[in-house]
Image: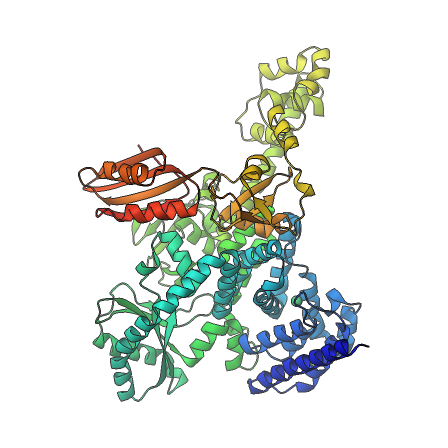
Amino acid sequence: MTDEKHRQEQEDEEMISQGFQQLLESYLTSKHRRKVEIITKAFNFAKQAHKGVKRRSGEPYIMHPIAVAQIACSEIGLGSTSICAALLHDVVEDTDYTVEDIENLFGPKIAQIVDGLTKISGGIFGDRASAQAENFKKLLLTMNDDIRVILIKIADRLHNMRTLGSMLPNKQYKIAGETLYIYAPLAHRLGLNKIKTELEDLSFKYEHPEEYARIEDMLKESKEEREELFNEFTAPIREKLDKMGIKYRIMARVKSPYSIWNKMQTKHIPFEEIYDILAVRIIFDPKDLEEESNECFGIYVTISKIYRPHPDRLRDWVNHPKSNGYQALHVTLMSNKGQWIEVQIRSERMNDIAEQGFAAHWKYKDGPSHEDEGELEKWLHTIKEILDDPQPDAIDFLDTIKLNLFASEIFIFTPKGEIKTMPQNCTALDFAFSIHTFLGSHCIGAKVNHKLVPLSHKLKSGDQVEILTSKSQRVQPSWINFATTAKAKAKILAILKREQRSMQQKGEDKLQDFLKDAEIEFNDENVHKLCVLHELKSPEELFSSIGFKTITLGEADLNELRIKKTVANNWKKIIPFSFGGNKSDKEKEKSTSRTPASKIDSKKILKLTPEAIQKDFIIADCCKPIPGDDVLGYRDENERIIIHKRQCPIAAKLKTSFGNRILAAQWETGKALDFPVNLYIQGIDAMGILHQVADIVTEQLNVNIRKIFIETTDGLFEGHIQLYVHDVDDVKTIIANLRKIDEMKVVTRVEKFEDRP
Ligand code: MN
């Protein structure tokens, strides 16, 4: 052995033992029982099993399980069973040991968790979307068996995200995309708010490195100002709380870069216009755990005597916890500088739950108690119901579940005054389904606060809702358009599908009888002829159309089937057997002249040169990226490469569903090509505003306007401009110049050009 190698090995040993010591220390300072022995045994076993294997970063592999165990212990607050399972989580997947070996050495509980983790490993998301949905189902089912499986999986993902830098860019986008699409919502739903925020920020950092750095810089620049505001605002509060003899700490909560960026994107506003970057948190030690909620309100009363509270912004999550267990009292107060500031009041116990979620409940009880899991239990129950209903489409299923993960909540009262938590923007129909499937499927309308409303009516927090039903009512296909909750959507689809199946059967029977009467054979060929006649894609569609009576069988059908045999034998040649998917000749020509995507090395970064854009790549129509936008490539099933913006919602789905088809891409166009871009403008109507806009764009900046549409109402103007630019820098210059017009209030880049009548 060379000296070099020997020294490296010693260094590795040192690093491993330090990592493990730190883990033990964290465990020993936690409130869990002291089971150092089994943890040490799990560590030694995993270390020996992964011996000689290195991660991409060059670290010994065992550093990863140690880090995952460390997160499970100190950031999620899990105990020895989970720590052991985390240390062993990759052993069955990556080495020759089996679950039985683990069971023999560590007992059934740890083995079961490791088994769960192994089943959902390999990335939840494989090559094909359906397989991925299957895996995701598995994951959610194991979550029902033992929630620790998913908590450790989240810890695993967090460590992988923290070390994402050593991965190839295309893998980075895939992993970051999955994280944002599924893991962050999952962490949120389980109440792991701190981890959720970190997962989001890390995804953001890898997908939009420049934007991330820019927001961090702006946060740094405005730090002093924020601290001053914080100190000034909290000084009188501290004084009062001290007088009351409360044990407390006050902290500044600064909005995360990802949430800031998200708000800038969705509201089309610059950083300077985001006013809730700073919030204030008061965390107190209750004198009496029983009186905790009263103390929250006591603090609220005290501070609202100092600053004026916003009348509509009191949120009582203390008496009505969110479904992820979150508890706190949120109030918004007017600072002396004329700025609204949110204050969150929580006890230390509530704060633990806010940061560590579900796992924190264990700290305050002897083990997980089933009665008190309450809201989370209910949520798991909903998930189980959705899983029990087979979903028609794998991607739909993912969307349905996702809907359920990330919604904000409102309170709805039943006619008897019971409170139900519902997701924001839910409709009367959603509410009906949330109470009972029967109520949902026979619902004809609702009374909201005693007033009659349609099923599509959007509910607001505090509404009292009575559902009106009729026995003759049946689920309507249009309902899917205004059902917003996962449960309602899943139920409606399942009922419709069931009905569809029975109608299909009815239609098939009817057709058989019809043909029998006419003495025509019921066979594939004849069924296909009728499909063609009625312009339907499949026999199933034909049957259900007959069943639903959208088609009535008659003379025309008989004539079609009685046409001479020679024609009948030829029909397959005339009408392609497979409908759709047949490219026109021109398209075929185009795709053959293109560099076949299969020849492209997925590890390399695609260079988007002017030539390649015209020849090899397709710019996605959904998000229309231009040079300077953060982009990625997607290799579609026809081996074409489509360029999407990284934050495009369609790309987000692709990253999650077809992660292995994602390619890293980089602009290298220079100023050679022109791209269309759309701007939205809004402001105060004044003489000659259109002229000013046109002048800035065409004269001063020498850019071509392609289309413009402006409309004025009540002294305000609003409209869209489409112009040709080289890149994002051009857009920035144009926006900055247009903003210089006094009357111009909003100028922002948008995806679509709209000209409303
Ligand atoms: Mn792992």
Q: Is residue 555 left or right of residue 442?
A: right
Q: Residue 712, located in which quarter of the rendered image?
A: top left
Q: Residue 679, located in which quarter of the rendered image?
A: top left
Residue 205 position within the rendered picture, expressed as x and y whole percent measured from the top left: 50, 61
Q: How many circles with numbers are drawn on the protein?
A: 0
Q: If the image is split into quadrants, where does the N terminus sit? A: bottom right
Q: Is residue 396 visible?
A: no
Q: If the image is split into quadrants, where does the C terminus sit? A: top left
In-front residue for pair 355/634: 634
In-front residue for pair 368/627: 627
Q: Quadrant of ligand 1?
A: bottom right
| Relative to 195, residue 683 above or below | above
Residue 330 position within the rendered picture, expressed as x and y whole percent measured from the top left: 34, 70
The residue lying at 33 percent from left, 43 percent from top is 680
| Relative to 625, residue 578 above or below | above
The residue lying at 57 percent from left, 27 percent from top is 546
Q: Is residue 49 left or right of residue 529?
A: right
Residue 675 position within the rendered picture, expressed as x and y whole percent measured from the top left: 45, 38
Residue 427 position within the rendered picture, expressed as x and y whole percent measured from the top left: 40, 50
Q: Is residue 276 left or right of residue 131?
A: left
The residue lying at 62 percent from left, 74 percent from top is 67
Q: Is residue 131 left or right of residue 717?
A: right
| Relative to 575, residue 698 above or below | below
| Relative to 345, residue 200 above or below | above
Q: Is residue 448 visible?
A: yes
